Amino acid sequence: MTIEIPKSVLQAIHDHARAAYPEECCGFLLGHSGAPRRIEESRRARNVATENRARRYSIDPLELLHADDDARKKSLELIGVYHSHPDHPAAPSEYDRSRAASWLSYVIVSVVDGEPKDVTAWQFDETARLFRSEAIVVR
């Protein structure tokens, strides 16, 4: 699978990750599903995790519903979620796996000493119960 991300959206994710450091940031990816998946815009979400926010994020389900509604109003779909990994690799954690949905893409940005570094994308395979890497094409 491939996911296309505009430079402006990648920059917005980097800005959010930088601002949230040393805590994880999180947000939504709106666009078009298909092959390839195409992200058109991102939308910040509040990290409502109550503990260990440097290693955990949680999104209020009501905020998720609002993002989905807003996407539909723009003829887009909620196709993914992004979050940061402060001072940690841009790979899904066991915590990420335990909360993943197979219909979403997960974009993870590692942030080292406050600066965004690697960006990866993943899709969860429900049957195998593991993440599969998605190729990122920046446009």
Image (spheres, rainbow, N blue to C red):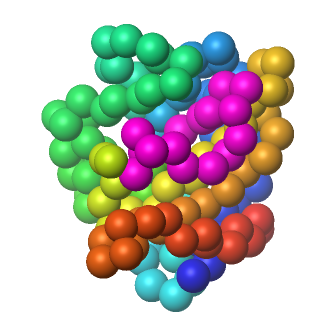
87 inside magenta stretch: yes
The quadrant holding residue 62 is: top left
Visible residue check, residue 124: yes
In the displayed orientation, state which residue is furthest to the bottom: 35
Can you give x and y, in whole percent of width and height, for residue 72 in the image?
26, 61
Can you give x and y, in whole percent of width and height, for residue 15 in the image?
70, 29
Position of residue 110 in the picture relative to residue 112 (left or right): left
Can you give x and y, in whole percent of width and height, for residue 49 in the image?
34, 19
Q: Between 60 and 89, which is closer to the camera in this rendering?
A: 89
Q: Residue at 22% of width from left, 51% of height from top?
A: 69
Q: Between 9 and 57, which is closer to the camera in this rendering?
A: 57
The quadrant holding residue 14 is: top right
Visible residue check, residue 43: no
* First to last magenta residue range: 83-97
Total numbered circles: 0
The quadrant holding residue 137 is: bottom right
Q: In which quarter of the image is the C terminus?
A: bottom right
Position of residue 45 in the picture relative to residue 50 (left or right): right
Q: Between 101 and 16, which is closer to the camera in this rendering?
A: 101
Q: In which quarter of the image is the N terminus?
A: bottom right
Q: Residue at 45% of width from left, 84% of height from top?
A: 34
- Image position of 43 with respect to 111: above or below: below
- Image position of 97 with respect to 101: above or below: above
Q: Residue at 30% of width from left, 77% of height from top?
A: 127
- Image position of 86 with respect to 96: above or below: above
78 inside magenta stretch: no
Q: Residue at 70% of width from left, 68% of height from top?
A: 136
Q: Between 126 and 134, which is closer to the camera in this rendering?
A: 126
Can you give x and y, in whole percent of width and height, for residue 114 in the image?
78, 19
